[in-house]
Amino acid sequence: FGVDKRRFKILNIAPEYPFPVQAKLPAALGAVHNFIRILDPLDEALGLNSVFSFHAAHRDNVVSETFLEDDDEQGILGQKVTAAERLRANERRDKIAQEMWDQYQSYLELLD
């Protein structure tokens, strides 16, 4: 949540939106943040914290390995990430996204 607060300043100020809209902002901005990270894993978001700064300092050495090899790799927090674990996480993320989309479509059908 700290990353989102630094990336999206609207979470730190009192927005001039109705409360029901304000309540949806953190989840929506979290989804935007995750979408950005999926499309651009090396996105630093203006050096939000030392983890991303550390990653940026070393990315030139590991970019090709990160995206081209299926062997174990270092995650941005220094832990080992296997190809199998990365695949499992991606499948879980996609499943959650699909469930959210299906729920949203069901909600829209109720409005009609």
Image (tube, grey):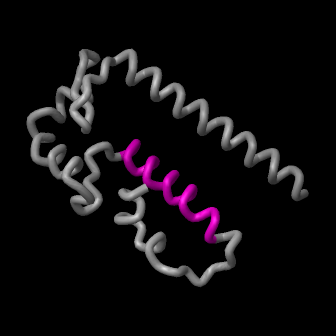
Residue at the extreme bottom: 16
Main SS of the magenta part reads helix
Where does the image place residue 32, in percent across and percent down from the top left?
Answer: 48, 55
Q: Is residue 106 left or right of residue 90?
A: right
> Nearest the camera: 9 or 65?
9
Residue at horizontal 47%, vertical 74%?
10
Q: Is residue 5 magenta?
A: no
Task: Verify whether residue 25 appears in magenta.
Answer: yes
Q: Give the left or right position of residue 41, taking residue 90 as reference.
A: left
Vertical side of 24 occupied by 81: above or below: above
Image quadrant in which the C terminus is located: bottom right
The residue nearer to you, when weighing 65 against 13, is: 13
Viewer-nearest residue: 98 or 7: 7
**Residue 56 position within the rendered picture, expressed as x and y whole percent measured from the top left:** 16, 48
Residue drawn 55% across the image and 80% down it: 15
Residue in the image at 11% along x and 41% along y: 58
Image quadrant in which the N terminus is located: bottom left
- The tally of labels here is 0
Q: In the image, residue 70 lies at what x, y percent? A: 28, 17
Who's the residue at 9% across and 35% down the image? Answer: 61
Q: Which percent across, then down, holds residue 104?
A: 73, 48
Residue range corresponding to the magenta coloring: 22-39
